[in-house]
Every structure is written in structure tokens, then in C-alpha cells.
Image (tube, rainbow, N blue to C red):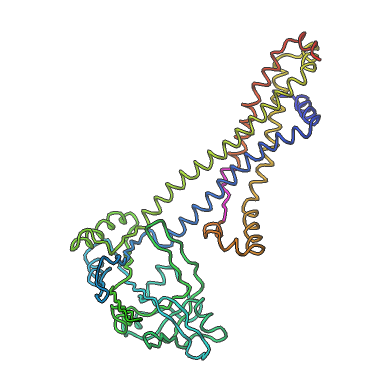
Amino acid sequence: MLSFRTWQLGLKSLFLHPMRSALTVLGIFIGVASVIWLLAIGEGISQKAQQQIEELGAENIIVRSIEPPDEGSSMRSIKAFGVKRVEHLLLSSTIPTVVEALPIREVPYKFVNTGNANAKPVDGRLVGCTPDYAMVTRLEIDRGHFLTSREVDSRATVCVIAGSLAAKLFPSDDPINQQVFLPELKEYYKIVGVLKYKMATAAIGGSFAGQDFSNDVYIPITTMQQRIGDTITKMGGGSFSAKEYQLSQVTVRVDDVENVPKTAKLVEATLMSREPGRQDISIVVPYELLEQAKATKLMFMMFMGLIAAISLIVGGIGIMNIMLATVTERTREIGIRRALGAKRGDIVRQFLVETIVLSVVGGITGILGGIVCPLFINLSLKIVENGFPELYARLPEVAKELEPQIVLLSIPLAFCISVLVGIVFGIYPAFRAAKMDPIEALRHE
């Protein structure tokens, strides 16, 4: 057992060289803080990625239409591609595990507030959908209501607009019951609802493109089919191009998450049965992406932890170096203590106490430094945003939206490792001091 007197002597010895002790503690501090920081940053990035995937719905299977590249086709031909309405009906009626299949069609257009003569057109996205679209994409109503089944069945010329677009088109008016004009189509749509702001989703690897909801206008998909049709044409400068796609996306809802993998295979088999190897669609399974993200998170956290552990080992080497120097400096003191009756075990305990104290102090300060990671990151981003706006604009979105999450397990883990490192790297200097010959030690100058 270590007596109080042993601890007292150990602390007193460290205070004889405060600068050296502080630098040794700094090594452990950096190691412990880096463990907490790296794991917190890794956890924050991982949670953000998983959140984006979860927003797609773990019970959903997403079939997206992809426009194939031009392969020497005539500039005046109509390019047809993507998911067809008959395929949408086939998915919802032939696969027993499918609860419903939601059809979606997206077309880029310009929108204008006809009540404002000075208003400029705003580029946005016209989205034809059903009432369940809001639930699937987690859209929240701010004012009015989302599209209803009656409006879809009657092919009503009504719309729901994103909050950001409403602020641009109607900066000082209430947009409810006003009209949005599409100059390219010469179409008017009555606004029945305004949505709350929804943050854009980032692209998920190469599987799913990012989605920006800020300038969306939502109309019944039946209205879009009747009034806009399936063919989008562009003319100008003597050129003509046209593309035909019936649906931009079909979101298939499965009855149980456990049935998602096998349902995904059935969906793929159904869509590929008529045209094997087709390149105009992609099938995204958020459940599989989520499982991959969790596995990647584990590997990423292990890698980050390994890097941080190296910092702790470097700190431990610093402890060993300082303690070996201390043994050399205190050779005469060791000889006197041995001559006065101190045993080898007493010398070992004395030097181990000093290394443990260094490790504990470094570990505690490292924990305090690690806990401030989220605050420091957020403050740094605010400073960069306000003081260096151009630099902030060039930062990737993952850096702008970074929110470190402290991994609670990392705090006791880092502390225990720091103490263990101190003991391991302090054993050799302690035993070296204990093995000194008392007579030779007394002769040392």
C-alpha cells in the first residue's frame, strides 16, 4: 500500500522542477484531449451522415430516374427515359410487402409573383406529388395545408410552396390564397400552404444526389400530368431538344424494415424484367446505406482512436525520458535513502507515485480540454464566418455543419489509458533507481 508520506514526497519532488513537470503533463494532456476530440469529431460526422440517410426512411426503397448521356442521337429526337407510370402501378400491385409506392415528378421552372410588377422570376423546382409526400420527406407546414386527396383527384390548380421561396416572392404579403405564375407555361397556381424551412440534404456517396427544398413548389401529380404532360422541350438559337420522362422518382414503402432487403431485390427484378441492364434508373436502399454507415463509423472511430492513442504513447515516452533524467539527477538522494534503511520497494513506489501523479494531472486537464471541443469548434466557425466570409464560403459543407458529439465512453477510456501509460513508462525508471548500489550512489556528485 502507498502511504500518505509516499504521495507527499512524490508531489514535493515534482514541484522542485515545475517547468519540467508541466511540459511532461502537457504531453499527456495533448494525448487525452486528442482522444476525446478525434472521437467527438468522428461521432459528429457519422451522426450527420446517418441522420441524412434516416431522413430518407429506413423502410423506404427509392427508385430514381436518371437521364442517360447523349450517344450520337439526333438533336431533334425525343429522349425517353426513367420510371414509367405502368411500372409504378406494377410495383404497388404485385409485391406483397409493399405498402404503397409514391410517384413523384420534378421539373425545373421559373416562378413569379404576379401581384408585384417589379418582381424578378425565381428559379425553382415544380414537384408533382401526392399528399403522403410531406410525410415521407418530413416536410412541415407553417401556414395553410399540404395537398389533399380531393385536390389530387380533382386535378386542382393549387400549390404548396417552400418557406424560402415564399419569402422571395412575397416579402411583405401573406402568400396564402395568392397565385404563383409560371411564365414558361403561362400557368397560374393558387397557394394553399407554406412550408417551414427544410435544410438541404447532402449527396450520399454516389447513390443519391443532394436535395434542395428551398425553392420548391408542390402541385398534385395528376394536375402536372394533365397540364404539363410528360415531354419537356427547349427551343432557342435555332436548336431544339426534348426529353420525356413520366416520373422522376418512386418511393416504395415496405411493411417492415426486416423485409427491405428482399423487397429491394424484387423491385430491381421487376424493373429489369423488360429491359435487363437498363441505365436510366437507380435503386437506393437507405436501410442498406444505414448499415454500411454504421460499419464505416466503427472502423472510422477505431482509426481515429488509434491515431489519438499514438499521442498518448508519445506522452508516455516523454514521462520515461523525464523520469530517467530525474533518476540520474537524484542518484545521491537515492543512495542516502537506501543508507538510512529504505528498501528497493520504497524507491520503486516513490518514483511510480511521481509518474502516476503526472499522468493523473495530465489526464484530468486533458478531459477538461476535450470537453470544450464542441464549444471551441462552433466558436471557431463563427469567427471564420464573421471575420473571413470568403474563406468560410470556400469551406466544404461538412465543415460548416460540423457538430462534434462527445463520446461519453472516451472520457474514462482516455483517462484510464493515460494512467496506464504513466505506470508502464514509469516502471523502468523506477526499477532502475531501485537497483542502484547504495555505496556507488553515495559517491555520485
Horizontal side, residue 355 vs residue 230: left or right: right
Where 37 sits versus 168, above or below? above
Residue at 39% across, 61% down:
57
Relative image position of residue 155 (x, y in whole percent): 32, 84
Give the magenta range.
403-410
Relative image position of residue 36 (x, y in whole percent): 59, 44
Residue 281 found in image quarter:
bottom left
Q: Is residue 405 magenta?
A: yes
Q: Quadrant of the C terminus?
A: top right
Where 246 sits versus 32, above or below? below
Relative image position of residue 118 (x, y in whole percent): 53, 89
Horizontal side, residue 100 vs residue 189: left or right: left
Where 36 sits versus 253, above or below? above
Residue at 51% across, 91% down:
117
Residue at 18% across, 63% down:
274
Please give the count of numbered marks on the rendered protein.
0
Q: Looking at the image, which is closer to me, 192 or 275?
A: 275
Looking at the image, the residue that sits furthest to the front is 238
Residue at 38% across, 80% down:
219
